[in-house]
Amino acid sequence: MSLRILSPIHKATRQIGLHLADKTAELGVSADEGHLLSYLESYSPAPIYELQRVFGHRPSTLTGLIDRLEQRRLVRRERNPEDGRSFLIALTDSGLELAGRVSGMVRQFEANVLTGVDEGALAGFREVMDAIGGVARVEIRPDTAGRDGNAEGRAVRRTPEPAIGKAGGE
């Protein structure tokens, strides 16, 4: 049995990743570093736990990624005023400039893809993605979140809906 949704999503994710890895290498950063910089362009400063949730990296992998960017003075760690035991990751001026270049490449890639897609197909794609979100019941970061890092934008697991029929006839 062929997976009609997940296999094409996996393939597309891999194609996008390889394409952007080549492009970010031209800027002197890895794909993961570029992805993190691009994310921070919109959500800096961001708590480390949020970055771990959004990117799905192990803590040691994320720490290494942040360390490399910090050594190159693209990001900096700041004390989290809401939790003195944790840090926020913020872009430096040079990090913001590089993040803008990475984001521009991503926007250009999307624009190129959209030249071959009509509005009906795009609406269908959004429908499938919404269905995946409904089944997964996990929000990584709502689209409404903004640069101010408001609580509305934090990663959450939505509460499952109550079961309709329970054992024992309830």
Image (cartoon, rainbow, N blue to C red):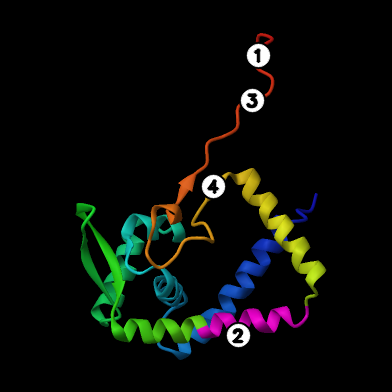
| Residue at 30% across, 84% down | 93
In three-dimensional space, the C-alpha distance between marks 2 and 4, rounded to whole angstroms, equals 28 Å
Where is residue 60 shown, x and y percent of the image? 31, 59
Badge 1 density bin: few <14, some 14–19, many ≥20, Cα 10 Å: few
The answer to which of marks 2 and 1 sits earlier in the sequence is 2
**Residue under label 4:** 138
Where is residue 109 shown, x and y percent of the image? 62, 82
**Residue under label 2:** 108
Magenta stretch bounds:
104-116
Q: Amino acid at mark 1?
A: Ala
Q: Residue furthest top?
A: 168
Q: Please say if the residues under marks 3 and 2 sit with CB atoms less than 8 Å apart.
A: no
In three-dimensional space, the C-alpha distance between marks 3 and 2, rounded to whole angstroms, equals 44 Å
In three-dimensional space, the C-alpha distance between marks 3 and 4, rounded to whole angstroms, equals 18 Å
Q: Amino acid at mark 4?
A: Val
Q: Amino acid at mark 3?
A: Ala
Element type where label 2 sits in the image: helix
In three-dimensional space, the C-alpha distance between marks 2 and 1, rounded to whole angstroms, equals 53 Å
Mark number displayed over residue 163: 3
Mark number displayed over residue 167: 1
